[in-house]
Image (cartoon, helix red, strand yellow):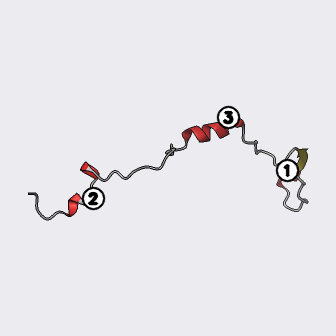
Amino acid sequence: MSRANDPSAPPRAFEAEDTEAGAQTLVPGVAPVTLGERLGLLANAPLLPRKGQRPANHGLFDTNARNQLEMF
């Protein structure tokens, strides 16, 4: 029986490396997030307005016009 499948075997410690941000644990099978993946997430995010937006309360979107009792 291999050690990987033996539940009575003591757990192996993960490897670690020192980086500029401090000690980082290396988990087997987990890859670090790359710059391309981060940029892809930002590119696929919904756009946000740069300025405050005025309400679209005219024409089709005028909610007060829906409350009128008569047309003329």
Disc 3 target residue: 36
Mark 1 highlights which residue?
25
Secondary structure beneath dot 3 equals helix
**Identity of the amino acid at label 1?**
Thr
Task: Residue 1: tell me if it is visible.
Answer: no
The one of 68 and 7 positioned closer to us in this rendering: 68
Q: State how far apart marks 3 and 2 are (Cα).
A: 44 Å
* Marks 1/2: CA–CA distance: 56 Å
Residue that appears at 77% across and 44% down = 29
Crowd class of label 2 (few under 14; some 14 to 19; many from 20; radius 10 Å): few
Q: Residue at x 25, y 50 (%)?
A: 60
38 to the left or right of 19? left
Direction left: furthest residue: 72
The residue type indicated by label 3 comes to: Gly
The kind of residue tagged 2 is Thr
Quadrant where the image shows the C terminus: bottom left
The disc, 3 or 1, on the residue closer to the chain's N-terminal end is 1
Q: Residue at point 81% right, 49% down?
A: 27
Height in image: 54 above or below 68? above
State how far apart marks 3 and 1 are (Cα). 22 Å
Question: Where residue 33 sits: x, y (%)?
Answer: 72, 42
Left or right: 30 with respect to 55? right
Disc 3 residue crowd, few under 14, some 14–19, many 20+, Cα 10 Å: few
